[in-house]
Amino acid sequence: MHARIASSIASLFVLAAAQAVAEPPAGQPVGPHGVGCNVTEMFGEHLHAHLAIYRGGVPVGIPANVGFVQSGGVVLCLYWLHTHDDSGLIHVEAPSGNFTLADFFAVWGEPLSNTRIGRYTGHVRSYVNGAPYKGAPGSIPLRDGEQIVLRI
């Protein structure tokens, strides 16, 4: 009797493991433009924008692997907006779409407004390619080669 129960339990674990491999959970779409998460990188839209953040003139780091959904060291899905390293380079690898800095911050899980960047509060000044940006920082479009600077 115990052997049959143990065999049934083992079969359930094998079935659950097979389903987990066949259908890895994907992250929920986030941000104003519904940034998705896929098992592999998407290449319909492939561009890179650079983000630098300064607080009181001191650089604030942007971490590596923003947008990677992992469990036990295994990548379950990768958001269309992500980082690979801590250089501030934002990778946009999506089936299509026009994304903004608000989308990236939603993937990162950090707030962004005219008065806040992550945990820091104060007046936020935004620059794109060296020129002041007049709109809300979250509305800055992510375009290939753009240099985005936020100062607080």
Image: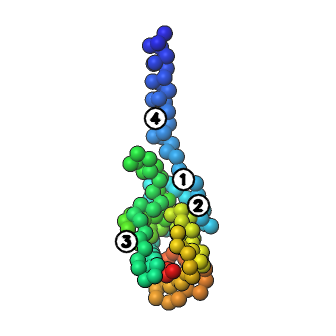
- Give SS at disc 1: loop
Residue beneath label 4, please? 17
Mark 4 residue type: Ala
Quote the CA–CA distance across marks 4 and 3.
Answer: 36 Å
Quote the CA–CA distance across marks 1 and 2.
Answer: 9 Å
Q: Earlier in the sequence, mark 2 or mark 4?
A: 4
Residue beneath label 2, please? 30
Q: Earlier in the sequence, mark 4 or mark 1?
A: 4
Q: Which mark is residue 87?
A: 3
Residue 15, how many percent across, how many down?
49, 30
In the rendered view, tell whether residue 83 sits above or below residue 115.
Answer: above
Farthest top residue in view:
1
Most foreground residue, 30 or 118:
118
- Give SS at disc 2: loop
Residue beneath label 1, please? 27
Quote the CA–CA distance across marks 3 and 1.
Answer: 24 Å
